[in-house]
Image (spheres, rainbow, N blue to C red):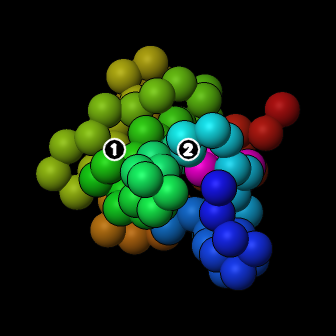
Amino acid sequence: MLSKVLKDVLVCTWCLGPLDEGAATLTCTRCGAVYALQDGIPNMLLDSARLHCPNCRREMKKGEGVAVCEACGRKFSLTERLPAQALEKGKK
């Protein structure tokens, strides 16, 4: 369980969205990225996170510096913030 101080300051490293705490994960309520909690310490590295496509919400495969959605073919940079317009397209 995270301390209140950590909960108040931690945000998604990909889109800066708020996080919900699960039993062993933190999940971004905006883009769906899932970060592991290891011994109560959040691993906020994108390389270790499970990322979901903002368009179709399926889990994406990660390569060198990019995440690719095999379902819809979209590609996103892992070295830049997720663009806000990408998040808007995924809302239905």
- Write down the residue under mark 1: 67
Which range is magenta? 26-30
Mark in the foreground, 2 or 1: 2
* Residue 76 seen in render: no
* Amino acid beneath label 2: Thr
**Image spot of residue 78 (x, y percent):** 34, 59
- Write down the residue under mark 2: 25
Q: Earlier in the sequence, mark 2 or mark 1?
A: 2
Taking 31 as reference, is 84 above or below it? Answer: below
Residue 50, image quadrant: top left
Which image quarter is the N terminus in? Answer: bottom right
**Which residue is drawn at the image coordinates 50% and 57% (left, top)?**
40
Q: Is residue 20 left or right of residue 31?
A: right
* Amino acid beneath label 1: Ala
Secondary structure of the residue carrying tag 1 is strand
Return the residue nearer the eye: 45 or 16. 45
Q: Is residue 1 left or right of residue 77?
A: right
- Graded by Cα atoms within 10 Å as few (under 14), some (14 to 19) or many (20 or more), the crowding at tag 1 reads many
- Graded by Cα atoms within 10 Å as few (under 14), some (14 to 19) or many (20 or more), the crowding at tag 2 reads many
